């Protein structure tokens, strides 16, 4: 009965969901395309063993890259289907895998749409990245006997409280999951408290520790740095949110008082916001360059193109290049943290040996930040003034700022936390009958 009420409510909200897609298409036209897939009209795929991975958007897709590559290396005869919810996630799939994987949008969670998707896509094994709980889709998987695994599953304080209010719906849905591979012990306990069977919950670690530091990314980062200017400090403010760009620009203004040649690379979390962010910076008197105007990604500017001058801000309005700019910069500020969004992944700049700054609102990665603070590998600031002062202090002796890999303690910590991908592959193979449990 509770799932029927959920379905009726979702059916009533579907026109609003489509309207929201159209509205978001003002900034990113891709939101107005491929609506048929969201309504269950996905391409019919050939019958063969198939791993289906659902990754909502960019972050989940990046986290899934080592998993997908490991599965493909171990099982080259399997097809791999990756579904996303956002156009930015879709673009990241193509950037990461090209045409070597199958891809479509995941339909809305209505029973007949979920059934159509599963019938046409024919998955053998399903892996849902992080915490996406869809009652009708999960019921459809159970009806077909399709093993479903929640990978890198986490529950923030906010999400846990919200799901607890819906426990009557969430508990039976979690009971349809073959395995919940939680990031850590606290996440595992929360899933059990929500009603997941304890025998199907296991803390396997954080897949984001298995992030690849590829030579190609390092080479692109070095090429960007050469063009931006090796003789100036460069810092990146990444994954910023509304209300945060103003603080970042204020901090940069403070930095310029001591480092007048410093360059800010500003990468909003959602690319459709870049026009608004660029207009904000221009209204404040900054010279704004948009990355997309320099060259068609992934191509870099030609050497004869002038680099950003003083009082310039480079706004990143392309997808999939954040790691390149982490590799190019001297210091990284990880956004979503000077506003109450819960922060984003600090491991990405850390693997390139970059000092990490964040605001205090990091509850989405609370355990990771706590361990990084204990290792003195991250600095939290609580205002634009504090961010500007810390940047100034760290860059006071630039270019002598340490550019090497993290120190031995941090490197050891990173290595100790790796291996989640291999553990997850083992559990997934057992669910697919490819090895003994």
Image (spheres, grey):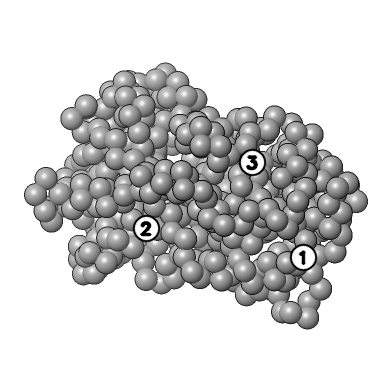
Q: Which image quarter holds the N terminus?
A: top left
Mark pair 3, 2: CA separation = 26 Å
Left or right: residue 62 versus residue 20 is left
Mark pair 2, 1: CA separation = 35 Å
Q: Which of marks 2 and 1 is nearer the N terminus?
A: 2
Residue at figure coordinates x 74%, y 54% from the top left? 398
Residue at figure coordinates x 47%, y 65% from the top left? 214
Which residue in the structure is indicated by mark 2? Answer: 66
Residue at figure coordinates x 27%, y 43% from the top left? 149
Q: Is residue 361 visible?
A: yes
Quarter of image, res 79: bottom left
Task: In this rendered view, identify the residue nearer to me: 331 or 306.
Answer: 331
Q: Closer to the camera: disc 2 or disc 1?
A: 1
Residue at figure coordinates x 33%, y 63% from the top left? 69
Left or right: residue 135 versus residue 337 is left
Q: Is residue 413 above or below residue 301?
A: above
Residues packed near mark 2 inside 10 Å, few (<14), some (14 to 19) or many (20 plus): some
Dot 1 falls on a residue whose secondary structure is: loop
Left or right: residue 287 versus residue 31 is right
Quarter of image, res 152: top left
Quarter of image, res 233: bottom right
Q: Using the image, tell me which numbered label, if any, was put on residue 357.
A: 3
x%, y% of residue 151? 33, 44
Mark pair 3, 1: CA separation = 22 Å
x%, y% of residue 280? 82, 47
Task: In this rendered view, identify the residue nearer to me: 212 or 258.
Answer: 258
Dot 2 falls on a residue whose secondary structure is: helix
Q: Which of marks 3 and 1 is nearer the N terminus?
A: 1
């Amino acid at each position: 009965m509770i799932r029927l009420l959920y379905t009726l409510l979702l059916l009533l909200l579907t026109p609003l969901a489509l309207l929201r897609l159209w509205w978001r298409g003002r900034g990113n036209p891709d939101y107005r395309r491929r609506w048929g897939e969201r309504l269950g009209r996905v391409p019919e795929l050939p019958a063969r063993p198939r791993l289906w991975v659902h990754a909502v958007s960019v972050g989940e897709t990046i986290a899934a890259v080592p998993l997908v590559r490991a599965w493909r290396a171990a099982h080259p005869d399997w097809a791999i289907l990756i579904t996303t919810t956002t156009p930015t996630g879709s673009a990241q799939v193509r950037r990461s895998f090209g045409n070597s994987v199958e891809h479509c949008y995941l339909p809305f969670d209505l029973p007949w749409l979920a059934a159509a998707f599963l019938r046409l896509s024919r998955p053998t094994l399903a892996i849902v990245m992080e915490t996406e709980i869809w009652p009708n889709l999960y019921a459809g998987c159970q009806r077909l006997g399709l093993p479903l695994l929640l990978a890198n599953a986490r529950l923030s304080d906010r999400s846990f409280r919200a799901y607890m209010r819906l426990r009557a719906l969430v508990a039976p849905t979690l009971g349809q999951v073959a395995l919940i591979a939680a990031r850590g012990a606290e996440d595992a306990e929360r899933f059990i408290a929500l009603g997941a069977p304890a025998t199907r919950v296991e803390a396997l670690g954080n897949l984001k520790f298995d992030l690849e530091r590829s030579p190609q990314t390092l080479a692109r980062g070095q090429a960007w740095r050469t063009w931006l200017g090796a003789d100036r400090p460069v810092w990146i403010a990444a994954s910023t949110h509304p209300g945060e760009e103003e603080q970042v620009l204020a901090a940069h203004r403070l930095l310029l008082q001591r480092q007048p040649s410093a360059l800010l690379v500003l990468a909003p979390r959602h690319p459709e916001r870049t026009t608004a962010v660029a207009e904000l910076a221009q209204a404040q008197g900054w010279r704004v360059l948009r990355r997309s105007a320099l060259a068609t990604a992934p191509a870099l500017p030609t050497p004869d193109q002038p680099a950003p001058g003083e009082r310039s801000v480079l706004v990143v309005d392309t997808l999939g290049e954040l790691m390149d700019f982490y590799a190019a910069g001297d210091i990284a500020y990880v956004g979503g943290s000077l506003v109450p969004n819960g922060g984003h992944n600090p491991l990405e700049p850390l693997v390139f040996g970059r000092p990490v700054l964040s605001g205090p609102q990091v509850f989405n990665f609370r355990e990771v930040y706590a361990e990084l603070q204990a290792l003195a590998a991250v600095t939290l600031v609580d205002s634009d003034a504090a961010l500007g002062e810390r940047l100034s202090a760290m860059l006071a002796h630039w270019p002598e700022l340490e550019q090497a890999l993290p120190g031995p303690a941090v490197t050891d910590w990173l290595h100790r936390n790796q291996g989640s991908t291999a553990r997850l592959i083992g559990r997934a193979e057992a669910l697919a009958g490819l090895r003994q449990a």
